[in-house]
């Protein structure tokens, strides 16, 4: 398999289409007239969670039919993206010459992905309730729901332990969240706009304190009909796969889905493509690439991190 197809496969296999790395350039939201502050100076953790969840919990769905994907190692691709709570997600990309290049989707029962140039061809799929115990998780210990959260619609679970907010330069706030996994406590670091409460970055570290994936979102836009806000650009980086990618959503429509729901949330069938169950005990996951050479600061957890108490 060529490097282009392998990197695509590693990314979709990880369920990380919307994640980006700490080494990626920051996006800057440009304002003619900056909006009034939503968060007070030096807010409490409860205030930050309330502002973030108030906007994001109202985003029940979105669709972007004129999206695009660009990155190192593969050509620019036209894309369509759709989401509907809780686990419904679809990302399809194509070129004008070859047609469909990949298809990544998730419904309430399972998730799937297909890469046109993968040899041998296959439609990989896995039930959500079988992922944690599957061979797929042994290679990539990240829940598929992460790809939805990283699109900028993540919420803070009040039932999880959080630390912060910690003040950062440029009016930003950092919140650290620990989640118990079969391998031990994993940490997620979320960077928030200190004025508007937008999620700017998400960084996920495993139990060994190694960076698995992260996302940087920018160019936040207020939907004119719903009044809700979400990013229109997401920069992608997955250090274990040495992969980076940029997704431009354009003018995504919030709480308005286009397309046939029955087709949108159904696993497709491509000619000559067998179905491969990632939860099959005999399945052998693709071998992951060696970790990218990144700085210790971007790959390691902060030196003073600790498991928060409730």
Image (cartoon, rainbow, N blue to C red):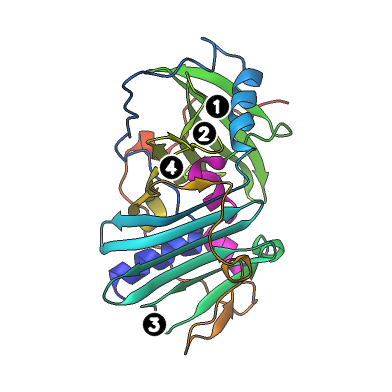
Q: Report the magenta residues as a range.
A: 133-153
Bin the neighbour count of mark 4 within 10 Å (Cα to Cα): few under 14, some 14-19, many 20 and up.
many
| Mark seen at residue 189 | 2
**Secondary-structure class at tag 1:** strand
Whichever of labels 4 and 2 marks the residue nearer the N terminus, that label is: 2
Q: Earlier in the sequence, mark 2 or mark 1?
A: 1
For mark 3, does the 10 Å Cα neighbourhood hold few (<14), some (14 to 19), or many (20 or more) residues?
few
What residue is disc 4 on? 215
Report the front residue among 276 and 255: 255
Residue 234: x and y in percent read: 39, 44
Residue 63, x across and y down, in percent = 50, 53
Residue bearing the label numbered 1: 175
> Left of 50 or right of it: where is 271?
left
- Using the rendered view, name the quadrant where residue 207 is placed: top right
Sequence-first disc among 2 and 3? 3
Q: Are the two marked residues, 2 and 1, in contact with CB atoms closer than 8 angstroms?
A: yes
Q: CA distance from mark 2 to mark 1?
A: 6 Å
């Amino acid at each position: 398999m060529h490097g282009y197809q392998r990197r695509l496969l590693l990314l979709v296999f990880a369920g990380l289409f919307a994640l980006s790395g700490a080494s990626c350039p920051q996006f800057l939201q440009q304002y003619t007239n900056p909006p009034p502050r939503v968060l007070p100076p030096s807010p409490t953790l409860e205030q930050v969670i309330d502002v973030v969840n108030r906007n994001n919990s109202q985003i029940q769905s979105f669709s972007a039919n004129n999206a695009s994907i660009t990155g190192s190692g593969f050509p620019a691709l036209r894309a369509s993206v759709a989401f509907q709570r809780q686990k419904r997600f679809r990302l399809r990309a194509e070129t004008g010459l070859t047609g469909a290049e990949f298809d990544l989707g998730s419904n309430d029962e399972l998730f799937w992905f297909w890469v046109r140039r993968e040899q041998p061809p296959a439609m990989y799929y896995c039930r959500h309730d079988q992922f944690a115990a599957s061979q797929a998780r042994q290679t990539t210990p990240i829940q598929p729901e992460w790809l939805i959260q990283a699109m900028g619609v993540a919420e803070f679970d009040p039932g999880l332990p959080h630390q912060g907010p910690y003040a950062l330069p440029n009016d930003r706030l950092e919140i650290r969240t620990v989640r118990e996994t079969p391998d031990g406590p994993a940490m997620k670091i979320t960077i928030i706009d200190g004025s508007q409460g937008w999620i700017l970055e998400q960084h996920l570290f495993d139990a060994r304190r190694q960076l698995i994936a992260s996302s940087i979102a920018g160019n936040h836009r207020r939907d004119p009909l719903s009044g809700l806000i979400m990013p229109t650009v997401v920069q992608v980086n997955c250090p274990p796969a040495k992969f980076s990618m940029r997704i431009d959503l354009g003018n995504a429509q919030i709480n308005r889905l286009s397309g046939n729901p029955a087709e949108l949330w159904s696993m497709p069938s491509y000619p000559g493509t067998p179905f491969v169950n990632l939860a099959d005990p005999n399945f052998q996951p693709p071998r992951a690439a060696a970790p990218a050479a990144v700085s210790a600061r971007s790959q390691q957890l902060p030196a003073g991190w600790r498991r928060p108490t409730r």
